[in-house]
Amino acid sequence: MASKNIAPTDNEIFFSEDQIIVSKTDLKGKITYANSLFEKVSGYGWEELSGQPHSLIRHPDMPRCVFKLLWDTLDQEKEIFAYVKNMAKNGDYYWVLAHVVSSYDITGKLVGYHSSRRSPKKHVVQQISPLYKGLLEIEKNHQNPKDGLQASLDHLINLLDNNNVSYAEYITALSVAA
């Protein structure tokens, strides 16, 4: 994965609230389509994106448990909304509110995933950043990555349970809060 060799910067990339980053992947998460805004914001050309794992743009500040939750939800053939910090080719970062759904062929067979991403509100990023930082710390405090992932996911689920909300309700509440 190329992003492991990229040093993250403190430079944030912004895109307009009326723009949508779109990508499609196969069942293994390899990119099969990216719109021009995806290319522009990520800094990668289509030749560099095509066939690559979507994790190419994963920022090291992102806790893995968020992606575990995302994949578990998709495995249940449910849609998911998630706030994600991505990393561009040059190490700059950008936040998105991702809406990911399953894609089916004409016969109804699952063939991949479709993600539409919007620019999140600043107050949401300010709220979600400390949570993600804490989840990432939990992951890093375990020698075994699988144990760290599970501990982080357990922490997130307990937090949601203690507030009597599902992950979807939590994301929706953040999105509509003033």
Image (cartoon, rainbow, N blue to C red):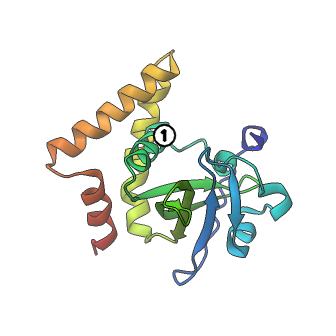
Apparent side of residue 127 relative to residue 100 in the rendered image (left or right)? left
**Viewer can see residue 78:** yes
Task: Find residue 61 and report its horizontal and vertical position in percent.
Answer: 55, 43
Q: Please tell me which residue lies in front, 155 or 92.
A: 155
Apparent side of residue 14 relative to residue 173 in the rendered image (left or right)? right
The residue drawn where x is 52% and y is 72% is 119
Task: Find residue 86 and report its horizontal and vertical position in percent.
Answer: 60, 55
The residue drawn where x is 38% and y is 32% is 152
- Residue at the extreme top: 143
**Residue 36, placed above or below residue 95:** below
Q: Please tell me which residue lies in front, 168 or 30.
A: 30
Which quadrant is the N terminus positioned in?
A: top right
- Residue at the extreme bottom: 18
- Total numbered labels placed on residues in the image: 1
Badge 1 is on which residue? 63
**Residue 14, placed above or below residue 73:** below
The residue drawn where x is 55% and y is 67% is 106
**Viewer can see residue 45:** no
Q: Report the amino acid beneath label 1.
A: Pro
The residue drawn where x is 43% and y is 45% is 75
Apparent side of residue 132 relative to residue 155 in the rendered image (left or right)? right
Q: Please tell me which residue lies in front, 144 or 178.
A: 144
Q: Please tell me which residue lies in front, 113 or 120.
A: 113
Which quadrant is the C terminus positioned in?
A: bottom left
